[in-house]
Image (cartoon, grey):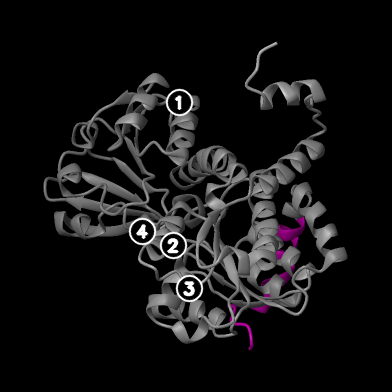
């Protein structure tokens, strides 16, 4: 099947981007060397749905180095980078993606990546699994299993599993330690603010930031906002996480109260319509709204439209909504994932661990798919430990190990 990209003449620029991240992804480089020797995917077809930028491109090249025929589509209309797509095509990977396609075209690209009848998949937000279950069950038959990148996707796949409809084994890469502890916290924390700052060119220090949701991503966003000098309010529906946010030094209150005080609002819940009419009605003039969850549903754009008298793009990736009372609210990146819709996503060194975990998990599910069955499983601890050890080695950091006597002590109920 022929690739669909916007402009092949952009390939040299895309290649430079991929070469840059490769230099800063030592763990994935080591796994690539191993894959080149062991060829875990030899003769197999792998379909990938991820944010199609340079770091994802290098993951695709690592999977290809393991012997696979790789087909890739973007998981977000705004995060696809056309130059990176062109460079991947030159490297022998089939790409179905363009920056900012219309909704029908975007969906068709996902379907085309599945129509190659893959043996394995890497999914983001459950886009592949949902499409396969709801619209194209005819394309399931060859799939041995796959890996899921995000919290949203894990939620969707677990729902399919619970109803007995998950059609093949999936590994919840998002739940691996080397994913959520680092990617979700440090990656999201930095990349969200990188994107907001480059998009708005406004100061954060002294402002009030409202973080909606205090999961691992919310922790990172709040921590980095505090580091930039902001006053931080956290809103939650989970009482335990609310106490944690309070003990981490943040104000905690209902969103309808926080809405009156906030200058920046960042939603990181994975749920829909968490910022809606009753919040928009009391926000102050100039409030900036951003979403750091997978889908563009956390900020209710229907309510924004209904409450506004006019709407225009005032700067790239900033839409101004003028309310009936004259207040102006600003939505970033169409309410899509701001760190990729208006930026380059997580730092390369962070995605080094995440995508290393993706690569070894894909090899694992290929080897063990018959044993796993049609279930979603967490990342086996030995894979997390493998990636962590490679990262420490790359950083030049050594750690201690238990003595034989200590191991016996920890495994015994007796105290000598």
Kindly identify the residue that appears in the image at 76 percent across and 48 percent down: 27
Q: Is residue 266 left or right of residue 88?
A: left
Decide: few, some or many residues near mark 4? Use Cα within 10 Å; few <14, some 14-19, many ≥20. many
Which portion, as a residue range, is magenta? 1-19
Q: Is residue 383 left or right of residue 172?
A: right
- In the image shown, does 278 or 148 lie closer to the viewer? 148
Where is mark 4, residue-wise? 296
Where is mark 2, residue-wise? 157
Decide: few, some or many residues near mark 3? Use Cα within 10 Å; few <14, some 14-19, many ≥20. many
- Of the numbered discs in the image, which one, if any, rests on residue 201? none
- Of the numbered discs in the image, which one, if any, rests on residue 167? 3
Q: Please say if 74 is above or below 412.
A: below
Foreground label between 3 and 1: 3
Foreground label between 3 and 4: 3
Please identify the quadrant where the C terminus is shown.
top right
Kindly identify the residue that appears in the image at 72 percent across and 45 percent down: 387
Contact, mark 3 vs mark 1 (Cβ under 8 Å)? no
Q: Is residue 390 magenta?
A: no
Give residue 231's quadrant in the image.
top left
Mark 3 or mark 4, which has the lower sequence index? 3
Mark 1 or mark 4, which has the lower sequence index? 1
Where is mark 1, residue-wise? 226
């Amino acid at each position: 099947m022929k690739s669909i990209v916007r402009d092949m003449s952009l390939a040299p620029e895309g290649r430079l981007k991929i070469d840059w991240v490769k230099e800063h992804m030592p763990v994935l480089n080591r796994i690539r060397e191993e894959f080149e020797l062991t060829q875990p995917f030899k003769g197999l077809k792998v379909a990938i749905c991820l944010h199609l930028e340079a770091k994802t491109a290098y993951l695709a090249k690592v999977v290809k180095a393991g012997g696979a025929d790789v087909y890739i589509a973007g998981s977000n209309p705004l995060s696809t980078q056309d130059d990176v797509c062109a460079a991947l095509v030159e490297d022998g990977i089939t790409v179905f993606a363009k920056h900012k396609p219309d909704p029908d075209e975007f969906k068709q690209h996902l379907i085309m990546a599945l129509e190659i009848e893959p043996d394995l998949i890497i999914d983001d937000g459950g886009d592949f699994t949902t499409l396969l279950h709801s619209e194209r069950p005819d394309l399931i038959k060859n799939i041995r299993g796959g890996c899921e990148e995000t919290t949203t996707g894990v939620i969707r796949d677990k729902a399919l599993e619970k109803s007995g409809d998950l059609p093949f084994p999936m590994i919840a890469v998002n739940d691996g330690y080397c994913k959520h502890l680092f990617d979700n916290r440090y990656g999201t924390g930095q990349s969200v603010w990188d994107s907001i700052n480059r998009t708005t060119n406004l100061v954060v220090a002294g402002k009030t930031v409202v973080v909606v949701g205090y999961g691992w991503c919310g922790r990172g966003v709040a921590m980095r906002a505090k580091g930039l000098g902001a006053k931080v309010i956290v809103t939650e529906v989970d009482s335990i996480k609310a106490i944690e946010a309070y003990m981490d030094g943040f104000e905690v209150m209902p969103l309808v109260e926080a809405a009156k005080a906030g200058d920046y609002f960042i939603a990181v819940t994975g749920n829909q319509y968490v910022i809606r009419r009753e919040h928009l009605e009391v926000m102050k003039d100039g409030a900036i709204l951003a979403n750091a969850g997978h889908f563009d549903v956390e900020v209710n754009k229907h309510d924004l439209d209904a409450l506004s008298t006019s709407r225009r793009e005032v700067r790239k990736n900033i839409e101004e909504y003028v309310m009936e009372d004259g207040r102006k609210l600003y939505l970033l990146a169409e309410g899509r994932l701001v760190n990729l819709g208006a930026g380059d996503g997580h730092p390369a060194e962070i995605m080094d661990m995440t995508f290393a975990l993706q690569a070894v998990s894909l090899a694992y599910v290929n080897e063990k798919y018959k044993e796993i069955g049609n279930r979603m499983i967490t990342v086996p601890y030995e894979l997390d430990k493998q990636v962590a050890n490679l990262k420490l080695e790359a950083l030049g950091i050594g750690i201690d190990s238990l003595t034989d006597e200590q191991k016996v002590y920890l495994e015994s109920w007796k105290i000598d």
